[in-house]
Image: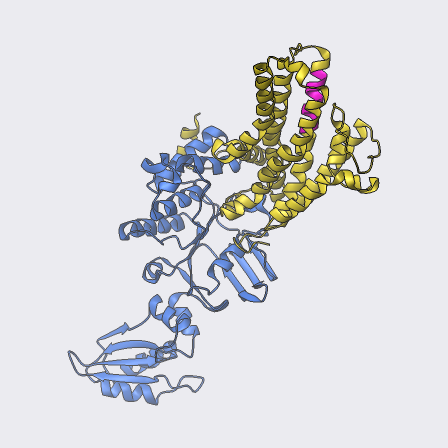
Amino acid sequence: MSSAARLEAPGALPAREPARGARAWVGYELARALRPRRAAALYALALLPALAVGLLGWVARLHGAEAGAMMSPGFYASLFELELKTVIFLGCAWLFIQLVRGELTGRTLHYAWLAPVRRSRLGWGKYLAGELAALAIFAGGTLLSRLLLLWLRGQPLLAAPALRSLFGYAGAAALACLGYGAVFFLFGACFRQALFPALAFYGWEQINFLLPSWLQRCSMIYYLHALRPGALPQHAWGFVPPPISIAAAAAWLLALSGVLAGLAVRRFARLEIYYGGEE
Amino acid sequence: MPTPAPIRPPAGDAPLIRLESVSRFYGDVLGVNRISLEIGAGITSLIGPNGAGKSTLLNLIAGLIRPTRGRITVLGHDPGDAEALFSQLGFCTQYDSFPAGARGREWVRQNLRLHGYRRADAEALAERALARVGMTEAAGRRLESYSKGMRQRIRLAQILAYEPRLLILDEPLNGLDPLARSEMAALFRALAGEGRGLLISSHILHELEALSDRVILLRDGYLAGEGGIAAVREDIREHDLQWLIRCPRPARLAALGLEARAGDGRPLCNQVRIFDRPEPALLLATAAPAAFFLALNDWIARGEIEVETVTPADDNLDAVYRYLVEEEPA
């Protein structure tokens, strides 16, 4: 019996399933986050490292130099440092703060609030959709720039070292999205003017190498540095960060992201909606 | 004609909405204070001037905000229990905003998907709801291009699509032209006829009057009155109800009315005005209409007076509203 035919019968509505509603919510949020009109700036930001690699390769070719020779092994490590601290940081700030604040300024959150989906599920769904979008955009951007560099260097893309490096950088970018995403989702849920705590956090991450080792642990970038395949850029001054294994760094990042996202979801689920004055 | 699903009647006489001494403050600012209410099936109108607390009350009932004090139960659930409540409750809020770029049909379907319906079912339910509010043709357009009236309709379609038992509508007639208002009013009556409860806030009083089974009046965050229109009026002792009585001897009726006393000692008539033209008539004001009409019947039965017609001079929502929520006339 078709749906239309079922509806003609005077009787019950078709069957509905709450879990299907939660899945639809994630799909809807993901589609919104990736919509070009909304995410154009994020796409442009994510393409910057690939553009930088391509530009340098082009300049190298113009001067008749071998791209591989011109681009030292430390080049991509420095570029990735910039990508972590700027592209992924700022991109996640924009994406995850907008997940909540965008709905409040656009006065549309009440539509979700009036759906028969538990509000904590709506919160987790938003975070998940944000993460999927961030992974697609920023881990995708990292993969693209790394692939371009390998191609310019003339290295075989399917060889084990290239693949290890590719997945290493993409994995670090993915964990950066997870961690920064959780922080900014929390900021979006807690602060009406989330820009200010985001700027403070940006400063904290930037000066991390100047901090004593025990304070360096209270940051995302400390754990992300441990995950990256390339060598760390050396600073002329500052403290040497205490060593941490890749597994421990990944576990810390996952745990920290989980706790922060949990706090954000808890706060999100308790939001009251009277736009302009929501608490 | 689309076939609406039958509505399960409320268990026993259980109210659809129950508020127990509910207060809501925004910091130091009063939203509503000590509201106790029970709202059942049929159409209930919520009226009051701007700032009276209508939207606050509706948002509390729908769980968009939480009460500072008191307890709310909607369809037997706490308003915070979204999973249990919002498949049975539809709320058209005062917020006239939509997600950017969405189209009408897609937006109604998306909401149904959020309710957990399969894609095909969501499509069928959306089409039925769009037809019911007369938006089938315009549903392919972007929501930004809609007129105010169309936005009202599409929001109504969004909640009608899953056939809730209780509909809460914040100013649903706002922005509609007279024909659309009339169509919408007919739709509300039809929905109430299907056994659903409707709680409607509006400042368009004459339309509510024709629609409402029950009225709730708010003023400055307080409940100013509730019940049937006449009952609300009866409750407000300090305001008189006016009646125009056509009779051959209005002076005699005026004398009787001014002399007589109600059971609690109050005069049955507070003010009278006698008219000779175009026909002899008496306009009187009474604070105790039930007692007055008992006395009037008695006078007629005893042959003291004759009465041709009795017409309420102000027994309508506009008069009640004016008395209760607006400034007193000088």
Where residue A252 sits in the image (x, y, percent)? 78, 34
Side of B62 relative to B144 (left or right): right
Task: Depth check: give the residue in front, B151 or A4.
Answer: B151
Q: Is residue B303 visible?
A: no
Side of A48 relative to B268 (left or right): right
Q: Residue at x 35, y 85 (%)?
A: B270
Q: Residue at x 57, y 64 (%)?
A: B23
Q: Quadrant of residue A146?
A: top right
The quarter of the image holding the N terminus of chain B is top left
Q: Which residues are magenta?
A: A163-173
- Asked if residue A167 is among those painted magenta in the image, a careful observer would answer yes
Q: How is the image coloured?
A: by chain
Task: Depth check: give the residue in front, B223 or B303.
Answer: B223
Where residue B208 sits in the image (x, y, percent)? 36, 59
> Which chain is depicted blue?
B
> Which chain is depicted yellow?
A
- Asked if residue A209 is among those painted magenta in the image, a careful observer would answer no
Q: Quadrant of residue A232?
A: top right
Where residue B162 sits in the image (x, y, percent)? 46, 40
Q: Is residue B189 visible?
A: yes
Q: Residue at x 82, y 38 (%)?
A: A239
Task: Depth check: give the residue in front, B127 or A127.
Answer: A127
Which residue is the extreme one toward the front?
A63
